[in-house]
Image (spheres, coloured by chain):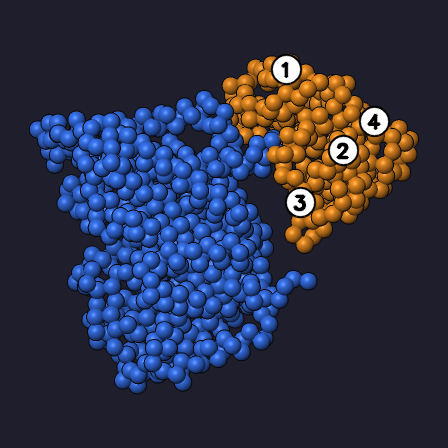
Amino acid sequence: MTLAAFASYMLTGLAGASSLFLVAAGLSLIFGVTRVVNFAHGSFFMLGLYLAVTLAGVFGRTPLGFWGAVVCASLAVGAIGVVVERLILRPLYAAPELLQLLATFAVVLIVKDAALWIWGPEDLLGPRAPGLSSAVPVLGRSIPEYDLLLIALGPLVMAGLWLLLTRTRFGRLIRAATEDREMTAALGIDQARLFTLVFALGSALAGLGGALQLPREPANLSLDLSIVADAFVVVVLGGLGSLPGAFLASLLIAELKAFCIGLGFSKATLVIEFLVMAVVLVFRPHGLLGRPDPPARATEAEAGEPIPPLVWIPVALALAFPLLAGGYAVILAIDIVILALFAASLRWLIGPAGLVSFGHAAFFGLGAYAAAIAALKLGWPMAAALAAAPLVAAFGAFAFGLVAVRLSGVYLAMLSLAFAQIVWSLAFQWDALTGGSNGLVGIWPAAAVADKTRYYALVLGLAIAAWLLLGRIERGRLGYAIRAARDSQLRAEALGFDVPALRRIALVISGAVAGLAGGLFVYSKGSLSPETLAIPRSVDGLVMVLLGGLASPLGPLLGAGLFTWLQDEAARRIEFWRALVGFVILALVLFAPRGLAGLLRRPRA
Amino acid sequence: MLTVARLEAAYGRAQVLFGIDLDVAPGEIMVLLGRNGAGKSTTLKTIMGLVAAAGGSVTFDGRRIDGMPAHEIARAGLGYVPEDRRVFAGLTIAENLDVGRQPPRAGAPPWDEERVYRLFPRLAELKDRRAGQTSGGEQQMLTVGRTLMGNPRCLLLDEPSEGLAPVVVDAMAEATTALKREGLAVLLSEQNLRFALRVADRAAIIEQGRIKFSGPVSALAADESLARAYLAV
Ligand SMILES: Nc1ncnc2c1ncn2[C@@H]1O[C@H](COP(=O)(O)OP(=O)(O)OP(=O)(O)O)[C@@H](O)[C@H]1O
Ligand SMILES: [Mg+2]
């Protein structure tokens, strides 16, 4: 590599770091004060860019028009953030973290469809910045002037935030609340107001980050999740709640990216990025500059009160109905039962084991690819290929567990997202084995179960067996030990339990069941693509689990049923079905926080 | 000024307070004595709105405050000093004091940084040091000073002498009596009978969430069997 090339990658990286830092700083501030992991942060970035494109068109091609558009877009996104905080998050601050997460994910869905409705599906390219549209030669290579401006802007914003946090009362209150919210309340500080202001600041920063991309990348509808994944990585890598950490991590990640792309390994970017994060977290479990976790609130996985026996009758009837009815009901029922099994494996991890996974689709996908590859490339019969699915997924879970079980709370969740991204990019890029983005086709079940109704019977039988097995383990000695490890690591260790080993076992069991669901999924569809294990599927799993409610083992089935049916119905009838799903999730989170199973349970005496 | 009547509280399903009655007048120090786990901290937290009251009432200046959010209770004039200090470790001493600042109240000289430093001169020397890097005694002074910055008219002090060196305990005792002379009402929780007898006017003994004795401290000093029955002496 020549010096000139090196300098040019370096500068491109620095420019990218600035926008990444803006987004990550907002996310980090919001998390620090409110303890909400805001999935919608990438949506705020996306809105900032779309709004800036529109406003720049309205304001005209003058420097004032351009910068006016950037500033107004950022302020508008701040205002949207306030509305989201007031209407959706405020009622949920006392609720379990997972419900908050689900609510912010509902916002992602709603914003995505709102953007589709307003701006349409096409990418929108913004104008160049007037007066900054040329390039400057640096060591013989040309660097866009705008990139140089961005390079200066990152440190400036960092300095501005630093002054805000250290020199103003608002900043001192933010720092105090990040350390101990309850104490600030006891000192007379109105948390609700503080939260709203912090949310406004954080979303305005995300909006600014988006608006500043105006001349650099077109506005499009997939920015939200890709940016939020990057921002998660940066925040976790830097240490949750630490601004200097976020700054450092943005530099690191953006430089890694710039060099990977510059040196021609653009395909490996994702993997490298997430590997760096995994390595850092193994050595520094709280990120580069983070402090030990604030004590995590225990997941609300109270022992489920018994579900009234009467509820089982309609459930059993509903499951049996497609066997007789055939037709479309069978196809839908196959989907529901497979996803319910996937959701049950996730509930097992979140509930009894207390480990939250944002990347559970990785295990589903490992199982699916294992079965598909065994069938297509190795020519295995269906029974063998189906058996390979849970085994390979369990092995993946074991490998993930080696790194992950020592991490706590949000860090583990983030690392699971990273793991899922690595598996996804392997599936996406390893053409020879996985077929790359085209995926694999032609995986058909054995003749005996080729008929859909028979295949459904097989799926139902295996799912019930796996589900009963999970229940037995949960109620048995192993389940007791795993729950003890969840409730108090210290106490469990004092009782002689090996907490990391227990967590690893919980992960492997959960991974195996998710893998089985993945194997059944492949044979039901006949084909497979990397979408099967992308972020949205992991989130679907979380949504189903939380819709159903954590406390009851019946929850995943109810959640998967409602979610799949809703998605299927809505997707067929309504253009903006995502937003509809989002509104339904919000309604359930706000009005039925214990999930569907909670609604069915007998009211407490 | 502060009247607590039949107060009940619970953590989840475990009830901890079973009908607590207490009252404190301006210029008076009331001490709540009890063993570990008797419910002293829970009583103070419930008054402060940090634990939800499950029954009974808390009246401050003739106004019901149970059910109000903690920050409104603080603004109404109740100051809370927690038992485990809970300073903002990453903020400097001066910044910690600033976080506690609230508007002055009519009829009382307002608290500011300088006045806190006059009460605890040691803090003035350390004002730019991060609170996390100060000693336990310094942190105790800081939490008291931080709460005073809110110009409270009634102070809830949770075990201010716990784990402190004798000189710091002396400083706390002096500060508490100085505040009382200014007309503050003070409700103090303690396990340390000596400290209690030294500063308090009246005492109540709490045992398993119930008040077992309430009266002037002189009565407590006179009757050793009380202390032996309910306190770790
Ligand atoms: N956060 C909590 N969750 C559940 N139970 C609690 C909690 N805090 C206190 N308790 C229980 O409530 C009871 C009263 O506790 P409290 O802290 O009020 O006692 P205390 O008199 O202040 O004791 P100490 O002298 O040790 O500070 C105890 O049995 C304790 O175990
Ligand atoms: Mg206590």
Question: Residue at label 3?
Answer: B52
Is the residue at mark 3 from the same chain as the one at mark 2? yes
Disc 2 versus disc 4: nearer the observer: 2
Label at residue B62: 2
Question: Residue at label 1?
Answer: B115
Q: Is residue A198 above or below residue A301?
A: above
Spatial CA span between label 1 and label 2: 30 Å
Q: Is residue B28 above or below residue A398?
A: above
Q: Tell me, what hue is chain B?
A: orange
Identify the secondary structure beneath mark 1: helix
Identify the secondary structure beneath mark 3: loop
Q: Amino acid at mark 1?
A: Arg
Is the residue at mark 4 from the same chain as the one at mark 1? yes
Spatial CA span between label 2 and label 4: 22 Å
Question: Residue at label 4?
Answer: B201
Q: Pointer 3 and pointer 1: residues touching (CB < 8 Å)?
A: no
The residue at 15%/40% (across/down) is: A262
Q: Which comes sooner in the sequence, label 3 or label 1?
A: 3
Identify the secondary structure beneath mark 2: loop
